[in-house]
Image (cartoon, rainbow, N blue to C red):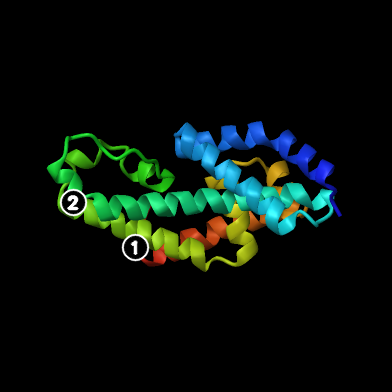
């Protein structure tokens, strides 16, 4: 069991790296700070009694989940308030979605037809569904490696498995996603 001192030392050791990683993902210092603070609070509240060796894995999982929750909230907020923005200035609501950035690299949504925007939104929804349909360990490895941009060693430590297992889970996830998306006629 981790003592208060050990928990505090652990949180101090990961705070800067977690903040940098969160800033990289959400592109906003205040939001990144909120995500890291929420993650630290959840770790202390729910898992402070766990052994010190388990804290890194738990913290990275909590941080990943908090980051994903932030993206979901941003996506919902953009959907709810996008029609209201037509009456305001031309400034876009700040936010960053990794999957959407892949599809919008060709020139942005402003120049896109409504048909293309709808098609892209449907494609993203299908990708999200297929990621959710992956087995838990494959999904976890895939998101940590390709969403969180963690290296194999970091992912293995967070998942509590070997680096070979991470590579296997990622490979199987990529194959399953490719096969499922191809079956639906989606080519990336």
Q: Earlier in the sequence, mark 2 or mark 1?
A: 2
Question: In the visual, does 43 lie left or right of 143?
Answer: right
Q: Position of residue 53 (x, y in %)?
A: 83, 49
Q: Position of residue 155 (x, y in %)?
A: 68, 47
Count of numbered circles in the view? 2
Report the Cα–Cα distance between label 2 and label 1.
31 Å
Dot label at residue 83:
2
Query: Can residue 104 be seen?
Result: yes
Of residues 2 and 149, which is closer to you in this image?
2
Question: In the visual, does 29 lie left or right of 101?
Answer: right
In this view, the mark in front (2 or 1): 2
Q: Which residue is mark 1?
A: 185
Of residues 100 and 29, which is closer to you in this image?
29
Q: Position of residue 182 (x, y in %)?
A: 40, 62
Dot label at residue 1:
none
Query: Can residue 167 be seen?
Result: no
Question: In the visual, does 102 lie left or right of 171?
Answer: left
């Amino acid at each position: 069991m981790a003592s208060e001192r050990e928990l505090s030392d652990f949180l101090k050791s990961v705070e800067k790296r977690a903040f940098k990683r969160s800033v990289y993902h959400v592109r906003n210092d205040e939001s990144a700070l909120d995500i890291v603070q929420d993650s630290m609070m959840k770790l202390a509240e729910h898992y402070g009694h766990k052994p010190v060796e388990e804290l890194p894995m738990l913290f990275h999982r909590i941080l990943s989940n908090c980051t994903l929750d932030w993206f979901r909230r941003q996506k919902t907020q953009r959907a709810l308030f996008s029609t209201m923005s037509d009456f305001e200035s031309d400034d876009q609501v700040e936010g960053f979605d990794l999957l959407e950035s892949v599809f919008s690299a060709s020139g942005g949504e402003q120049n896109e037809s409504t048909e293309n925007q709808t098609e892209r939104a449907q494609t993203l929804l299908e990708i999200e569904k297929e990621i959710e349909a992956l087995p838990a360990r494959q999904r976890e490895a895939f998101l940590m490696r390709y969403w969180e941009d963690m290296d194999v060693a970091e992912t293995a430590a967070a998942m509590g498995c070997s680096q070979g297992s991470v590579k296997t889970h990622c490979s199987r996830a990529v194959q399953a996603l490719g096969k499922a998306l191809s079956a639906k006629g989606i080519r990336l």
